Image (cartoon, rainbow, N blue to C red):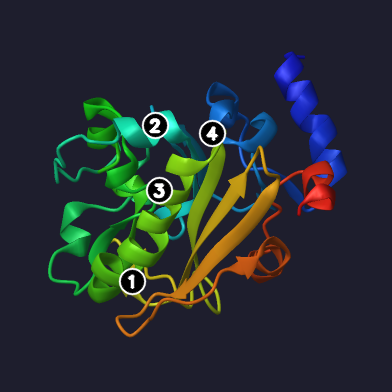
Amino acid sequence: MNPIYRYLAVIALDLGSATQSYADQGFAACPQFFAQGIPPVVETRPMQRALCYDAFAILHSGESKTPVLVAQRLNRASVADADEKRTNRFFPDARLRSTERATLEDYQGSGYDRGHMAPAGDMPTAKAMAQSFSLANMVPQAPAHNRGTWATSVEATTRKYASRASGNVFVITGPVFSPSIAESPSIGIGQVRVPKYLFKLVYDEDENRAWAYWHENSNDTKASAPISYEELEKKTGIVFLRSQIREELK
């Protein structure tokens, strides 16, 4: 067995139950985006695909046709390099089956923005910037929220924090569907599901601190205080960090 797969299996026993597993061993190709190289533990569901990009990694759901979560590693150097010109060239990711991915047409006239989970403003190279416009990195997001509160009080604040941190800051962003994926509203012929909430987890590796932003996906959402790691785990059912880290969080 490949050593990294053996390591993942051991950690999965540490973190998960029989109904949970690492989303996909495909993340073995990009462990750098996860704290200690270990992806989160999520409930196993159909049509989940792990996708690695230059500056982020995505667990994608063919059920919702959105990410389950998107992982990044930020630090002073990466933020300093994030000065690329925004491309705005959205595209469907050809690595996903056509029946599992969103299309440009799904979003047209929907009333929702194509909301980045890994922000374009975080991208350190032209290639990473282009990749960030994959529809696999998007959720249908309320326009005023996407361009206002989320952009300023969550994305920009996280970037500012990472620019001052002494080491790596691991960030995981994603949607939450309520009461379920199937019962959530959808847009387009492809029925891309609209999340009720969005979250962004921030984990400072050197300081061993973690917190999360939790926002309703609404034009009326205002800035709010972050929630604890424990509260995010309860709200999402996702185990983002291995037990040793969780037990030692400040």
What residue do we see at 47% from left, 49% from top?
Answer: 161
From the top left corner, tell me how far across and down residue 110 is, in percent: 19, 72
Q: How far apart are marks 2 and 3 (CA)?
A: 10 Å
Rendered image quadrant of residue 217: bottom left
Which residue is the extreme one toward the top? 2
Structural distance between the alpha carbons of marks 2 and 4: 13 Å
For the residue marked with disc 4, what is the amino acid? Phe
Residue at the farthest bottom position? 220
Q: What element carries label 4?
A: helix
Circle on res. 119: none
Quadrant placement of the C terminus: bottom right
Q: Can residue 189 be seen in this view?
A: no
Q: Position of residue 106 (x, y in %)?
A: 22, 61
Across and down, in percent, residue 72 comes to 48, 40
Amino acid on which disc 3 is placed? Arg
Residue position for label 1: 149
Q: Which residue type does callout 1 highlight? A: Thr
Q: Name the residue under label 4.
A: 33
Crowd around label 2: few <14 · some 14–19 · many ≥20 (10 Å): some
Residue of label 2 = 78
- Looking at the rendered structure, the kind of residue marked 2 is Ser
Q: Which of marks 3 and 4 is nearer the N terminus?
A: 4
